[in-house]
Image (cartoon, rainbow, N blue to C red):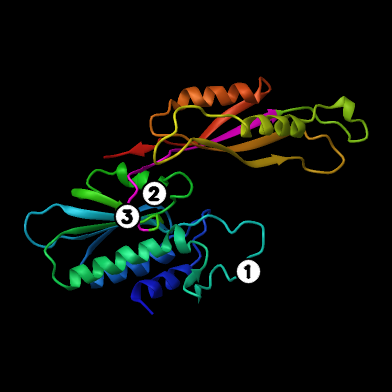
Amino acid sequence: MSEALEVTRELLRLRTINPPGDEARCIEPLAARLEAAGFSCRRFDLAPGRPNLVARYDGAGDQQAIAFTGHLDTVPLGDAPWTRDPFGGEVLDGRVYGRGASDMKSGVAAIVVAACRHAAAGSAGPVEIVLTAAEETGLEGAARLAGIPGSLGDASALVVAEPTGNLPAFGNRGTVWLEITFEGRTAHASAPEHGINALLMAAEAAVELAAHDLGGAQHPVLGRPTVTVSRIQAGSNFNSVPDRAVLGLDLRPLPDADLDAIIADLAGLAGPAASLREVVRCPGLWTD
């Protein structure tokens, strides 16, 4: 079994679902591995138990470093039962199973193992490894690092170890999360005509929003922008008309999108009874 696969399986056995994250479970053993290989490591906490790690190997000469980055948090398991242990790191027929196997504990394992081998060989080229927390909830760990002067070294290139099938990807669509709240009026379910059903208002808006075309030309690589209705919360009991409902939207805009105009269009579709709150805004990017 390869060393990178072994490290991947070790990371999969450590639960780092975000929220709450607990990324230190993975980052601390990786820091120990990097330090043993000759990297200098610095930690920049996002919150207790949620460090970002910047590890540097200076090599020799005056070359600029190549930087590699990955995150250690994962999305939740979902409501449907898994057929494999999500924290087992089981290997079957050439595949490894677990929450975060592709996004992106295997990528982190690969760059850490490769970096340690590079340093152990006494290679001249400097390398920086940047491991972040809280990527899945709006790139919070990376934003924290970007806001700390001197936290990151100079680098000629940054390689992100997200799963791309080993094909280089030179950008990505953005991420915008919106929370839309509908206010109704409660009433007993035996007399619904006395209330205003916020859940139905939200459901009608959800259909409109899901069908909305964000517009713009299709990107030759990134494709089209998308909007997904990803959450709905309403009602506290069976025998009352729900007086409040909340929709969650996930937008994936293209790099040149006018985000303010898109959000204004969606607010208009939601209707005058709705209020909109922006939760996450990460514009898309593209580089040559």
Instruction: Give me the residue at 59% from left, 70% from top.
Output: 84
Q: Quadrant of the C terminus?
A: top left
Sequence order check, earlier mark of 1 and 3: 3
Placement of 261 over or under 169, stated as above or below: above
Q: Is residue 42 visible?
A: yes
CA–CA distance between discs 2 and 3? 12 Å
Instruction: Give me the residue at 16% from left, 59% from top.
Output: 126
Viewer-side label of 2, 1: 1
Residues shaded magenta: 166-182
Q: Quadrant of residue 23?
A: bottom left
Left or right of residue 200, residue 94 in this image: left
Left or right of residue 104, residue 155 in this image: left
- The residue closer to the viewer here, 10 or 52, is 10
Tell me, for residue 83, which label it has, or none.
Answer: 1
Q: Secondary structure at mark 1?
A: loop
Placement of 265 over or under 284, stated as above or below: above
Sequence order check, earlier mark of 2 and 3: 3
Placement of 191 over or under 231, stated as above or below: above
Q: Is residue 83 magenta?
A: no
| Mark 1 neighbour density, 10 Å: few (under 14) some (14–19) many (20 or more) | few
State the residue lying farthest toward the bottom.
Answer: 1
Left or right of residue 221, residue 155 in this image: left
Q: Quadrant of residue 205?
A: top right
| Mark 2 neighbour density, 10 Å: few (under 14) some (14–19) many (20 or more) | many
Q: Is residue 175 magenta?
A: yes
Q: Where does label 2 land, which residue?
A: 141
- The residue closer to the viewer here, 254 or 61, is 254
Instruction: Give me the residue at 55% from left, 22% from top.
Output: 265
- Label 1 near label 2: C-beta < 8 Å? no
Tell me, for residue 69, which label it has, or none.
Answer: 3
The residue type indicated by label 2 comes to: Gly
Task: Provide residue 167's location: percent of width, then percent of height.
Answer: 35, 54
